[in-house]
Image (spheres, rainbow, N blue to C red):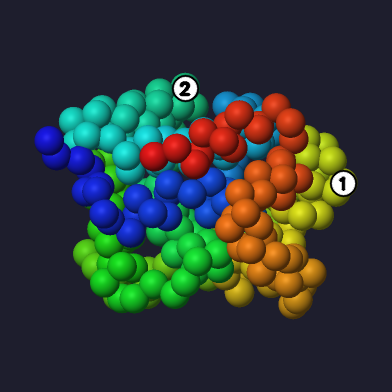
C-alpha cells in the first residue's frame, strides 16, 4: 500500500497535530488577505461570507492529501484542480500561475514555521520533505515553474513575498470579516498568532507589531499538552461551531 506521504514522515507529524494546523491557518489567513489575487476568492463570495470556513477548507484538503493513499490523494488533488477550473470558466479568466504557486508556498512555509514554534527546529532534510510533498501536489495540479528543491524554493518564496503581496481594500474588508466571525477576543488572539509565524514582509504590510504577548503563553501551552489540557486553549482560539473540526485535526 502506497501513501502520498509515507508513514514516519515529518509531514505527517506536522499535519497530525491540531495546534500546529491552527497556526498554519493563522498564517494563511494573514497572507491570503494580502495576496494580489485575493479577488479570485471574492469572486465566488465564499471567502467574505465565511472566511474561517474557506480557510478550514483549504487546510482540510491539504490534510486529506497528506494522510491518504496515493490513489485517493491524486483524486483529491484532481478535485481541487477541477474546482479551480470551474471558477475560471465562470469568470472567463485564468487564475495566474503565480497565485497557484503562492498557495503552495504558503503551505510549505507555515508548515515549517508553525512546527518550529510549537515543537522544535527542523533540519534541512526535514524541510526538504515538507517541500517535496507540496511540490508533488503542485506537479499533479499542473502548476508551472515550480522550484525543484528546497533551496530554490527559498529564493522563489522571497520573490513571491516581495512581488505578490499588497495591502488593499480586500485586505481591510477581509480583516473586518475575521473580526466579525471571531469576535474581538479571538480576533486579537488570531493577530498575535499571525505575528508569531508571519514572514517579515507580511508583518510589515499588516503592521502586526514586534512582540507578541502570546509568545510567553506558548510555553504554558506546551506544558498543558503534557496534562492533556491543551483542548481548553484550543477552544479559546475559534468559535464553538468549529470545536468538532478542531478535534478532528488531531486524528491521524
In this rendering, the answer to whether 165 lies above or below 54 is below
Q: Mark 1 and mark 2 in contact (Cβ < 8 Å)? A: no
- The local secondary structure at tag 2 comes to helix
- The local secondary structure at tag 1 comes to helix
Q: Which one is nearer the viewer's eye here, 140 or 88?
A: 140
Residue located 14% across and 39% down the image: 2
Give percent across and percent down for residue 181. 78, 35
Mark closest to the chain's N terminus, 2 or 1: 2
Direction left: furthest residue: 1
Quadrant position of residue 47 = top right
In this rendering, the answer to whether 55 lies above or below 32 is above
Q: Which one is nearer the viewer's eye here, 16 or 196?
A: 16
Give percent across and percent down for residue 51. 66, 36
Give percent across and percent down for residue 13. 38, 54
Instruction: Give the crowd class for mark 2: few <14, some 14-19, many >=20 residues within 10 Å.
Output: few
Q: Which one is nearer the viewer's eye here, 17 or 23?
A: 17
Residue identified by numbered label 1: 184
In front: label 2 or label 1: 1
| Quadrant location, the C terminus | top left
In this rendering, the answer to whether 141 lies above or below 43 is below
Residue 46 in sight from this viewpoint: yes
Residue identified by numbered label 2: 90
Instruction: Give the crowd class for mark 1: few <14, some 14-19, many >=20 residues within 10 Å.
Output: few
In the rendered view, does 112 fall on the left or right side of 203?
left
Direction front: furthest residue: 227
Amino acid at each position: 500500500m502506497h501513501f502520498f506521504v509515507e508513514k514516519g514522515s515529518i509531514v505527517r507529524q506536522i499535519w497530525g497535530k491540531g495546534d500546529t494546523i491552527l497556526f498554519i491557518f493563522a498564517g494563511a489567513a494573514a497572507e491570503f488577505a494580502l495576496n494580489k489575487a485575493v479577488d479570485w476568492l471574492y469572486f465566488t463570495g465564499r471567502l467574505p461570507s465565511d472566511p474561517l470556513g474557506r480557510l478550514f477548507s483549504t487546510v482540510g484538503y491539504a490534510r486529506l492529501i497528506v494522510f491518504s493513499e496515493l490513489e485517493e490523494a491524486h483524486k483529491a488533488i484532481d478535485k481541487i484542480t477541477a474546482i479551480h477550473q470551474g471558477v475560471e470558466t465562470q469568470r472567463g479568466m485564468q487564475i495566474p500561475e503565480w497565485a497557484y504557486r503562492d498557495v503552495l508556498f504558503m503551505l510549505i512555509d507555515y508548515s515549517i514555521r508553525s512546527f518550529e514554534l510549537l515543537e522544535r527546529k527542523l533540519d534541512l532534510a526535514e524541510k526538504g520533505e515538507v517541500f517535496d510533498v507540496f511540490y508533488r501536489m503542485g506537479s499533479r495540479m499542473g502548476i508551472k515553474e515550480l522550484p525543484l528543491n528546497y533551496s530554490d524554493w527559498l529564493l522563489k518564496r522571497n520573490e513571491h513575498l516581495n512581488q505578490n503581496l499588497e495591502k488593499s481594500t480586500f485586505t481591510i474588508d477581509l480583516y473586518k470579516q475575521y473580526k466579525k466571525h471571531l469576535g474581538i477576543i479571538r480576533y486579537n488572539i488570531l493577530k498575535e498568532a499571525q505575528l508569531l509565524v508571519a514572514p517579515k514582509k507580511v508583518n510589515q504590510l499588516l503592521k502586526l507589531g514586534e512582540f507578541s504577548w502570546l509568545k510567553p503563553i506558548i510555553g504554558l501551552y506546551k506544558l498543558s499538552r503534557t496534562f492533556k489540557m491543551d483542548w481548553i486553549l484550543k477552544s479559546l482560539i475559534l468559535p464553538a461551531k468549529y470545536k468538532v473540526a478542531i478535534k478532528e485535526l488531531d486524528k491521524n
